[in-house]
Image (cartoon, coloured by chain):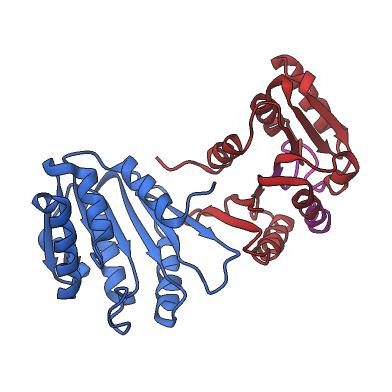
Chain colours: A blue, B red
Amino acid sequence: MLLNILQFVQHHIKLAVQAGDTVIDATAGNGHDTVFLAQCVTNSGKVLAFDIQSSALLNTRNKLNELGLSEQVSLIQAGHEHIQNFCHTGVSAIMFNLGYLPGADKNCTTQVTTTLAALEAGLNILLKDGLISVVLYPGHEQGLIEAQTIEKWTAQLPQQQYEVLQYRFTNRIHHAPYALLLHKRI
Amino acid sequence: MLLNILQFVQHHIKLAVQAGDTVIDATAGNGHDTVFLAQCVTNSGKVLAFDIQSSALLNTRNKLNELGLSEQVSLIQAGHEHIQNFCHTGVSAIMFNLGYLPGADKNCTTQVTTTLAALEAGLNILLKDGLISVVLYPGHEQGLIEAQTIEKWTAQLPQQQYEVLQYRFTNRIHHAPYALLLHKRI
């Protein structure tokens, strides 16, 4: 009955995004979020999808091609901390799915410093009423540090400008993933 | 764009409750939740509303009368830890709104021990797919202790039987209220 983490995030991203919008997948990974965003904006919109791993972008490209969604997506092999080099304003949603690429090198994981830089850049280019979703994975060591740091950083965002919402199942073993939503109010 | 705590709780209670159901307001207080539950179950259903303060029950009774909702509500002047004396099974939803009655004696607040006893009793009489909502108020000293204790207790509920979800705005000053939902899975 309760939406799981993925359903919850997608439900809110859908509410924030319209056909024709510009949106960002900050962690293309296996392409799951990129496909979802490409469907939300339709071929009149634009998705910028970032990843530093070429294998991630290749997987994502293949998925988009299969589904006929390539037209509205630009795949960018760069760290998400460089978002503002590729997009300066007018973004209605940005999705972060942190951690490592499933099935690939577990040592190649998102890093606290670059993730925080990307979040800060993301807030800068977000439209009023835009939304950033962050899925955190505290189940591995680096992920736990990252989750705690991001939680602390987001909790200090000024209440007048942002709403920060945590959606988390608390009785799961092995530190299950959870979501943060950052809503830009003004 | 994001549902506030009250909207979030009501949205999920509505999904869990049908006309004709039996439900419980564990903290009648000013009657807000009792009215909402009475509307959910309609006059074919039943609401049991508990409070230890007669002024709370009087306020609630007046509100129900004004709205023509008295028929389906039993007001019970007893602590919610005694729920099972009044109802043994078959409940689809229970709402807890902790802390003290707005406008009344702030020293008359819910207490950790009795709240935990009530939650445990509540889980016992809940139907499969039933829902308990708990709104916590960590902004006053007793409320903070209560919130922390309940958070810890609910986080240890077995995952096979229950989902425990936390919905919380994290960048609010003065420890804003937040919600827990307990969903009985089997």
Asked if residue A159 lies left or right of residue A34, the reply is right
Queried whether the magenta region covers residue A149, the answer comes back as no
Whether residue B29 is visible here, answered yes or no, is yes
Name above or below for residue A104 compared with residue B165: below
Give how far across and how far down residue B167 sits, in percent: 53, 52
- Of the pair B185 and A114, the residue shown nearer to us: B185
- Residue at the extreme bottom: A107
Q: Would you identify the image quadrant in which residue B146 lies? A: bottom right
Give how far across and how far down residue A16 sits, in percent: 31, 42
Queried whether the magenta region covers residue B106, the answer comes back as yes
Name above or below for residue A25 compared with residue A159: below
Magenta stretch in the rendered image: B95-118
Determine the residue positioned at 79% across, 19% down: B71
Asked if residue A69 lies left or right of residue B3, the reply is left
Number of disc labels: 0
Give how far across and how far down residue B111 sits, in percent: 80, 54
